[in-house]
Image (cartoon, rainbow, N blue to C red):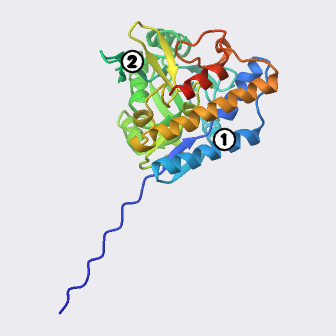
Amino acid sequence: MSTPASTPESAPEKLTYVVSADVAGLMGRWAAQNGLVVPDDAYFANMTHDLAVKLAEVTEGPVQIITQKEMFDGMDKLVSESPYPVVSLDRAYFDADHPTIAGFVDVTRAVQETTDENGVKSFESIEGLTPRPGAPSVEEQVARLKETLGSTPVTLVDDVVFSGETPAMVVEALEAAGIPVARFITGIGIKEGVERLTALGVEVVCVKAYDDVADEVCERDFLAGVPMSGRTVVGEDGTHWSAPYVEPYGNTKKWASIPDAGARALSQFCLGQSFDLWRKVEELNGQLIPSHMVPRPLKDARSDQSIVDRIWHDYFNY
């Protein structure tokens, strides 16, 4: 009697890679502040679509885009309903002109860049809270909020809660200063981070919630030079700059959870998108956009060098 052939186990379902689309709004705000124009909404929609297609190709898994409108409308509604003053950790969706924001805590994740004897660069995470470039120290920011808010309970808001490590440190810093954190509003909340905040006694309210994801990355982090893009890098000489999540500037594999085999292809694609975006901005405004005008200048950029020329050079020398 023959033995039935065994049925191979099906491969586990891949986790979704989530991207929050925010470049159109950020570029539009930057352009308005500088008396410039940027491409229309259709241009940015096509950029986002093409990025999603490329991410699906290199990760070989599902990709979900959360639109800027869905993010902002959801968070704005929750913010407007907060019974407590709202302090924002996010300036991508809430700026100083928003009527219900009582203050900001401008902090970010930072890494230290080091170079070994062979010239190979690496990035090591810096522990603790790091102020965003140009922002006062974390201690000074907390002291200012204390002067303004006293001991009133507050709501914090941020676009994404992933591991929850940075938001938890903000909660602890505020509460150590006598500012209780009662609620945390986020556009996208991942279970691990939500549970970390909940364990601190903070109520967490999400526009979109996930048990687990392959990663969640803001669209801006894939593009060179755009507002608020990238991770803060501290050089060995103490200088600071922002590096997008693509090579040769940042660590595509680690920061964006991209498999080794796809990191170079994704980086080349994102460099191409960055080049095309800034070239279009220059064409629309009939002028070069020098590095000193760019929201996130690249490392060692000459202040008078066109961002388009710089990206072109990096693309062909990568």
Which residue is at the front of the view, 299 or 85? 299
Name which residue lies at 82% across and 21% down: 286
In this rendering, the answer to whether 204 lies above or below 155 is below
Q: Residues within 10 Å of mark 1 (few under 14, many from 20)?
A: many
Measured in 3D between alpha carbons, the distance from the residue under mark 1 to the one under mark 2, in whole angstroms, is: 30 Å
Tell me, for residue 113, which label it has, or none.
Answer: 2
User: Can residue 83 be seen?
Assistant: no
| Whole-percent x, y for residue 316 in the image | 56, 28
Tell me, for residue 296, which label it has, or none.
Answer: none
* Left or right side of 95 for 239: left
Name which residue lies at 36% across and 33% down: 200
Splitting the image into 4 quarters, where does residue 167 fall?
top left
* Left or right side of 273 for 105: left
Q: Residues within 10 Å of mark 2 (few under 14, many from 20)?
A: some
Which residue is at the front of the view, 185 or 254? 254
Three-letter amino acid code of the residue under disc 2: Glu
Specify the farthest residue to the front: 316
Q: Earlier in the sequence, mark 1 or mark 2?
A: 1
In the structure shown, which secondary structural element does the residue marked by tag 2 occupy? strand
Specify the farthest residue to the bottom: 1
| Whole-percent x, y for residue 115 in the image | 35, 16
Which residue is at the front of the view, 87 or 105? 105
| Whole-percent x, y for residue 291 in the image | 64, 14
Which residue is at the front of the view, 164 or 39? 39
Specify the farthest residue to the top: 237
Three-letter amino acid code of the residue under disc 1: Met
Q: Total of numbered circles in the picture?
A: 2
Which residue lies under the disc numbered 1?
Answer: 47
Name which residue lies at 58% across and 49% down: 53
In the structure shown, which secondary structural element does the residue marked by tag 1 occupy? helix
| Whole-percent x, y for residue 190 in the image | 44, 43
* Left or right side of 35 for 268: left
